[in-house]
Image (cartoon, rainbow, N blue to C red):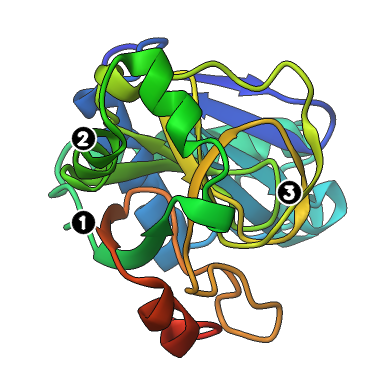
Amino acid sequence: MQQIQIQPEGDHAVVVSFGKENNSVVRAGVRMLARALAEQPLKGMVEYIPAFTSVTVIYDPVLVYKEAEGQALGSGTLLPYEIVVGKLDALVQTLQEQQVPPESVVCIPVCYGGEFGPDLEGVAALSGLSVEEVISIHHGVPYQVHMLGFAPGFPYLGGMDRRIAAPRKATPRLFVPAGSVGIAGEQTGVYPISTPGGWQLIGRTPAALFLPDRQPPALLKAGDMLRFYPITRREYETWEGTSP
């Protein structure tokens, strides 16, 4: 973790970067800091957002200053940003003594092709493979959730086989149903809610990845491992609206 950098992001956020390259060491640092912040939230922290190579910490400057007031750290000469950086730096120093948190594995059923995957045959044609081979390759490997974004609970998944990589659609769809499983470049992902989108759609899961009333609302979190497995249309209808 020798490349760790802590920099401001506006007037109430700080970015802790673990490196520029998205590799296993950098991802382990992101997961360890995210776990530390979940277990020991900083006073005045609003939320933390894990990403591919960094964690962004959003804080309330007034609460940070009030919390530090009267303590050595809040002697009146430090800005809230400096207080947060000081605490984050101290927290980061402890990460090297900790074990990388274990990965949670979530299995998600997918009904491939047909009306659920209108781009499946196109992806197969682009790759020079059969539809059956694309399906087998897609669900044949585990994926790591690098980050959530774009839409609530949308997982950016790493580890997809390059043989089934496909470009984003030239013209995005105005409506992509919730649960749609797509490919864009060398990534695959799942639309947790209905939204416009330009990924190549190859299937759909009946599992609910985002429910506002659930705690936490998102089924997945950064660092989780995800496995897809194929199901039939009948099984899809039986599963619809449930959580894995």
Q: Nearer the viewer, residue 243 or 54?
A: 243
**Residue 101: image location, x then y, percent:** 20, 55
Q: Quadrant of residue 231?
A: bottom left
| Disc 3 element | strand
Cα separation, mark 3 vs mark 1, equals: 27 Å
Q: Is residue 144 above or below residue 111?
A: above
Asked if marks 2 and 1 touch (Cβ < 8 Å), the reply is: no
Q: Nearer the viewer, residue 239 or 210?
A: 239
Q: Position of residue 142 (x, y in %)?
A: 20, 46
Horizontal arrangement in the rendering, residue 37 relative to residue 84 (left or right): left
Asked whether the residues under the numbered discs 3 and 1 touch, taking CB atoms below 8 Å apart as contact, a structural biologist would say no
Which comes sooner in the sequence, label 3 or label 2?
3
Q: Is residue 52 visible?
A: no
The reply to whether discs 3 and 2 touch (Cβ–Cβ < 8 Å) is: no
Q: Secondary structure at mark 1?
A: loop
| Closer to the eye: label 3 or 2 | 2
- Residue type at mark 2? Glu
Which disc, if any, is residue 194?
none
Q: Which mark is residue 59?
A: 3
Instruction: Give the residue displayed 77% in from the left and 29% down from the top.
Output: 172
* Residue 107 location (% of width, % of height): 27, 66
Residue 133 numbered mark, or none: 2
Q: Select label 3 or label 1 by which is in front.
A: 1
- Name the mark nearer the viewer: 2 or 1: 2
Q: Which residue is mark 1?
A: 103
Classify residue 28 as left or right of residue 59: left
Q: Quadrant of the N terminus?
A: top left
User: For residue 160, which quarter of the picture?
Assistant: top left
Asked whether residue 148 is in view, the answer is: yes
Q: Amino acid at mark 1?
A: Glu
